Image (cartoon, rainbow, N blue to C red):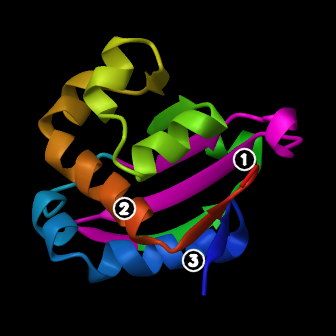
Amino acid sequence: MTYLFPSDEWISALKEQINASPAYKESGATWEAGDVCFVVKADPKNGLSEDWYILLELYHGECREAKAAAEEQASNAAFLITASYDRWRQLFQGELDAVRAMMMGQISIKGNLGVLMKYTKAAKDLLECGGQVPSTYLGD
């Protein structure tokens, strides 16, 4: 079974992948810095009419909750990682390195970068979990 990105089903599958990942369990073992929100910008050419906010409640190498959130709720997350639909696809498919994308302005991050830089391995492991969700992308 494949899941349409983004969708509630895809987000549930992401949570399962995160919690099944020994790599993330280890790299995020000391994470106490708050929730992370993936912001997927609207992309009408691919059929995504509005922004999606994927809110992840992460703590000590686990994803306690993962859900689509309203903008108001998402804006309270400790970290907001924003990218276009195509960039998220590239990140999940391993075609784009998150740190390089940030340095090149292809993704934006709101939150304490000092803390986030200590967890670059955990961030990469999260993206890898997203890549392991059997996905169908808009525009395919």
Query: Residue at (72%, 66%) from the top-left corner?
Result: 7
Q: Quadrant of residue 17?
A: bottom left
Q: Do labels 3 and 1 touch, CB within 8 Å?
A: no
Which quarter of the image is occupied by the N terminus? Answer: bottom right
Q: Do labels 2 and 3 touch, CB within 8 Å?
A: no
Query: Residue at (25%, 34%) from the top-left corner?
Result: 116
Q: Please tell me which of labels 1 and 2 falls first in the chain.
A: 1
User: Which residue is labeled 1 in the image?
Assistant: 52
User: Which residue is labeled 3 in the image?
Assistant: 12
Q: Which residues are magenta?
A: 34-63
- Comparing marks 1 and 2, which lies closer to the viewer? 1
Q: Where in the figure is residue 74, as x and y percent of width and height?
A: 64, 44
Crowd rating for badge 3 (residues with CA inside 10 Å; few <14, some 14–19, many 20+): some
User: Which residue is labeled 2 in the image?
Assistant: 58
38 w.r.t. 13: above or below: above
Name the disc covering residue 66, or none: none
